Image (spheres, rainbow, N blue to C red):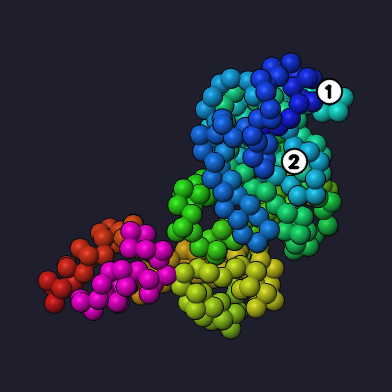
C-alpha cells in the first residue's frame, strides 16, 4: 500500500505535484508521508510496516509486475480508500484487523483518504506456489482479491511481527520463516481461488525419530539461523504440516521451543559465576547482551545478573 503516479491524479482529482516526481517507495507510498517504514525479508517473503498519520489526500499506484501478491493487515481503525478499477471505482473502510489481498500482476490505483498503519506481506510467486503445492485437497488457482474484510487470525499473526520489525537485529530466520509459512498457508486455505471449507485439523504428531532429528537441528543453530523448509525437508514433510505436528508433539512452536532451550542453556552457563554475561549471550544465540537480558527477564521474571546472584547466595 503505497503512493503512486500521474494517471490517478488526473482521474481522481488530486492536485498535481508542483514540480518533478514525488519520491515513492517500492510499494508506491509517498516517502515523505511515512512515519514508519520498516522491512524484513526471508525466503521469498518481504514484510513491511507502513504508517502514515497525515490526513491530507494522497494516492498510491503500482504498475503491473510479476512480483507476486500483497497482503495488507490494518493495525488500527479509521482508514478509508477509494480503489480505481478499469471501468469503475470502489470505496473500502478498514478497521483494526481488516485486510486486503491483491496481485501485483494488476495495476493498482487508490486514493488514500485518511492515514493508515499496516503490516504488509509481499509473497513472491515461487513462495506462493510452494504453499499451493503443499495444500491438502483440491489445488487452488492463486488468491482471490480482498478489500476491507476482517480476519482475526491474520491480525494476530501481524501483531506478532511488530516487535521483529522494530528490532530487526534480534530477529531469527526461524521466527520469520515460521510466521511467513503460517500466513501463506492460511491465505491459500482461506482465500485461494476454488478453495473449499475444510474440517478441523486432525491430530498430527512427529514420529520419535523425526522429533529427535528436528530438535538436534534446532540445537545446532541456537541463533535460529535455520529455515522451516530445511527442517521440514529433512523429515520429508510439508512446512505447514511440520509446524502443526511439532506444536502437537511438544506443545510449542519451533521458535518457542528454541527460545526455551536458549534460556535453559543460559541458566547452566550462569552457574559459572565468573563468566561474562556478554559471552553467555553470544553462546546462547542472542544478538547481544541487551537482547539476552530482555528475553531472559521475560521468561524467568528477573534479569540474568540478578538470577545468578540469587543462585550464588543460595549455595
Closer to the camera in the image, 238 or 62: 62
Residue farthest toward the bottom in the current orientation of the protein: 209
Residue under pointer 2 = 102
The magenta stretch is 267-291
Q: Position of residue 116 (x, y in %)?
A: 57, 30
Image-based side of 277 in relation to 101, left or right: left
Give the quarter of the figure containing the N terminus: top right
**Residue occupying image coordinates x 21% and y 69%:** 308
**Residue occupying image coordinates x 23% and y 79%:** 272
Give the quarter of the figure containing the C terminus: bottom left
Q: Residues within 10 Å of mark 1 (few under 14, many from 20)?
A: few
Residue under pointer 1 = 88
Residue farthest toward the front in the current orientation of the protein: 19
Residue 251 in view:
no
> For residue 279, which quarter of the picture?
bottom left
> For residue 50, which quarter of the picture?
top right
Q: Could you tell me how far apart the alpha carbons at marks 2 and 1 are, in whole angstroms?
A: 17 Å
Mark 1 secondary-structure assignment: loop
Pointers 2 and 1 in contact (CB under 8 A)? no
Q: Earlier in the sequence, mark 2 or mark 1?
A: 1
Mark identifier at residue 310: none
**Residue occupying image coordinates x 53% and y 69%:** 225
Q: Position of residue 101 (x, y in %)?
A: 71, 41
Q: Residues within 10 Å of mark 2 (few under 14, many from 20)?
A: some
Closer to the camera in the image, 85 or 232: 85
Residue 30 in view:
yes
Q: Position of residue 132 (x, y in %)?
A: 77, 58
Amino acid at each position: 500500500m503505497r503512493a503512486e503516479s500521474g494517471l490517478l491524479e488526473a482521474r481522481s482529482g488530486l492536485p498535481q505535484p508542483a514540480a518533478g516526481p514525488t519520491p515513492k517507495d517500492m510499494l508506491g507510498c509517498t516517502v515523505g508521508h511515512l512515519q514508519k517504514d520498516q522491512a524484513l525479508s526471508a525466503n521469498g517473503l518481504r514484510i513491511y510496516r507502513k504508517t502514515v498519520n497525515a490526513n491530507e489526500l494522497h494516492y498510491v499506484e503500482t504498475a503491473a509486475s510479476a512480483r507476486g501478491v500483497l497482503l495488507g493487515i490494518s493495525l488500527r481503525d479509521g482508514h478509508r480508500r477509494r480503489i480505481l478499477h478499469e471501468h469503475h471505482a470502489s470505496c473500502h473502510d478498514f478497521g483494526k484487523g481488516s485486510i486486503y489481498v491483491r496481485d501485483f500482476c494488476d495495476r493498482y490505483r487508490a486514493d488514500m483518504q485518511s492515514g493508515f498503519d499496516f503490516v504488509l506481506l509481499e509473497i513472491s510467486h515461487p513462495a506462493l506456489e510452494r504453499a499451493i503445492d503443499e495444500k491438502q485437497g483440491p489445488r487452488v488457482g492463486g488468491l482471490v482479491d480482498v478489500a476491507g474484510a476482517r480476519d482475526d487470525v491474520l491480525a494476530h499473526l501481524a501483531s506478532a511481527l511488530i516487535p521483529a520489525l522494530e528490532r530487526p537485529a534480534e530477529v531469527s530466520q526461524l521466527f520469520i520463516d515460521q510466521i511467513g509459512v503460517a500466513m501463506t498457508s492460511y491465505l491459500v486455505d482461506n482465500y485461494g481461488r476454488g478453495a473449499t471449507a475444510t474440517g478441523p485439523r486432525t491430530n498430527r504428531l512427529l514420529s520419535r525419530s523425526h522429533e529427535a532429528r528436528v530438535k538436534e537441528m534446532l540445537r545446532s543453530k541456537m541463533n535460529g539461523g535455520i529455515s522451516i523448509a530445511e527442517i521440514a525437508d529433512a523429515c520429508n514433510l510439508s512446512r505447514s504440516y511440520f509446524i502443526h505436528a511439532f506444536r502437537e508433539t511438544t506443545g510449542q512452536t519451533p521458535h518457542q521451543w528454541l527460545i526455551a532451550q536458549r534460556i535453559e542453556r543460559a541458566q547452566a552457563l550462569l552457574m559459572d559465576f565468573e563468566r561474562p554475561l556478554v559471552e553467555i549471550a553470544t553462546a546462547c544465540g542472542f544478538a547481544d547482551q541487551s537482547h539476552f537480558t530482555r528475553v531472559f527477564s521475560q521468561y524467568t521474571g528477573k534479569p540474568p545478573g540478578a538470577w545468578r546472584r540469587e543462585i550464588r547466595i543460595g549455595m
